[in-house]
Image (spheres, rainbow, N blue to C red):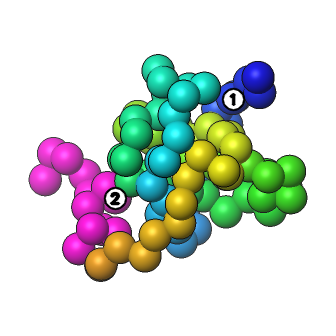
Amino acid sequence: MRVCWPTMRRQTQAADYVVCVDNARYPASLELHKIYRTLPDEDARADGDLRIVDDSGEDYLFPAGLFVPINPPDKVRSSPLRDSSS
């Protein structure tokens, strides 16, 4: 089993979106059918991983095969990026 370590850096590059289709190995970390934002990470992709942003705003590496890429509408894309206090 691969250990998922958070990164301490914040990235503001354009995000891609994926849907979790398999959380069997990470039931405490991933929610099945949930939309997740990803961050660009070429090293992770080369290793078959994606850098996934969780609800706390931290990012973690997970195997790419657990997700399917999606292209949500603009309203959905902006939703997870909004400040919840506004």
Question: Closest to the observer: 9 or 23?
Answer: 23
Q: Label 1, on which residue?
A: 4
Mark 2 vs mark 1, CA separation in Å: 23 Å
Q: Is residue 53 visible?
A: no
Question: Closest to the observer: 22 or 75?
Answer: 22
- Is 83 on the left or on the right of 48, as rendered? left
Residue 56 appears at what percent x and percent y?
Answer: 41, 34
Q: Which residue does the image show at 40% across and 36% down from the upper left? A: 31
Quick check: 18 above or below 58? below
Label 2 neighbourhood size at 10 Å, few (<14), some (14-19), many (20+)?
A: few
Quick check: 14 above or below 21? below
- Is 63 on the left or on the right of 38, as rendered? right
Instruction: Please state the extent of the stretch shown in magenta in the rendering.
Output: 75-86
Residue 51 appears at what percent x and percent y?
Answer: 64, 49
Figure quadrant of residue 75:
bottom left
Quick check: 58 above or below 33? above
Q: Secondary structure at mark 2?
A: helix
